[in-house]
Amino acid sequence: MSEEKKVVATAIKGGPLKVVGEIEVKLLDGTTEMKPVRSSFCRCGLSANQPYCDGAHKGSDFEAE
């Protein structure tokens, strides 16, 4: 019997969505990537590394909770 691991997603105020746990990310071009530990996903739309956060929200007026 396999043990399922818990995945936790946390929205950071004024920042990215942080995901801790192993996940499969399906990209717009149809490819997939496995992220084994943690990932930060862009919520502001400014990242040059979509769908991942590159810190572009810093210094912007992005204020989502």
Image: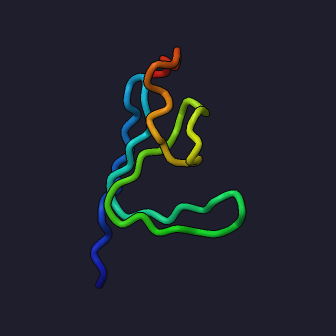
Q: Residue 48: which quarter of the image?
A: top right
Asked whether, in this view, residue 13 is left or right of residue 43, the answer is: left
Q: Residue 37: which quarter of the image?
A: bottom left
**Residue in the picture at 64% in, 69% down:** 31
Q: Position of residue 62 (x, y in %)?
A: 52, 19
Asked whether, in this view, residue 25 is left or right of residue 55, the answer is: right
**Residue in the picture at 53% in, 34% down:** 43
Q: Position of residue 13 (x, y in %)?
A: 39, 24
In this view, the residue farthest toward the bottom is 1
Q: Position of residue 53 (x, y in %)?
A: 48, 42
63 lies above or below 55: above
**Residue in the picture at 52% in, 39% down:** 42
**Residue in the picture at 40% in, 34% down:** 11
32 lies above or below 39: below
Seen from the viewer's position, the closer of residues 63 and 8 is 63
Q: Position of residue 16 (x, y in %)?
A: 44, 36
